[in-house]
Image (tube, grey):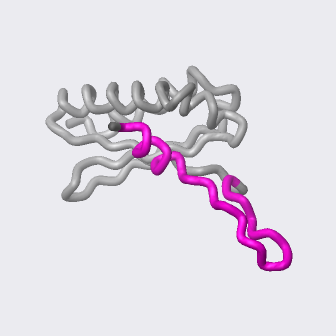
Amino acid sequence: MSAEKDQEFLEYVIKAIVDHSEEVVVNRSVDEMGVLLTLKVHREDMGKVIGRSGNTAKAVRTLLRVVGMKYNARVNLKIEEPDGGRLAPAEGGASVPTMKTVDEAMADLQL
């Protein structure tokens, strides 16, 4: 397989939909589970990458599976949370609910 085709595809698609295309970073790793593409985007672009009800992220993952099938590889996508994406603990030790990661929220959406 031309190893970086899936990575190039993801970069192309994501850069086309975000406002801060210069901050799109895709890292690629391969292990026994297949290919893992890790995506980092500017904080303001997270909503565009995820989409309403996670539909954009689901569609990108589906397309990556198709690209992977062409090269007999299993391709997975992890969307990294931007810096400052989680709520900090409240002063005085009061507990504050933590936000879910993008991948946890996506897993909740899949039935």
Q: Residue furthest left?
A: 72
From what the image shows, is residue 74 above or below residue 20? below
50 displayed left or right of 92? left
Q: Residue furthest bottom?
A: 93
Where is residue 27 drawn, in percent x and y? 45, 49
Residue 95 magenta-highlighted: yes
39 displayed left or right of 91? left
Which residue appears at 50% of the width and 31% of the height? 54
Where is residue 110 drawn, in percent x and y? 36, 38
From what the image shows, is residue 70 above or below residue 84? above
From what the image shows, is residue 2 above or below residue 102? above
Which residue appears at 58% of the width and 22% of the height? 17
Quadrant of the frame with the C terminus:
top left
Which residue appears at 67% of the width and 40% of the height? 42
Where is residue 35 drawn, in percent x and y? 29, 47
Observer-nearest of 86 and 91: 91
Task: Residue 1: name its quadrant.
Answer: top left
From what the image shows, is residue 28 above or below residue 51? below
Which residue appears at 62% of the width and 54% of the height? 99
Residue 1 magenta-highlighted: no
Observer-nearest of 25 and 82: 82
Q: Residue furthest right?
A: 91
What range is drawn magenta here? 85-110
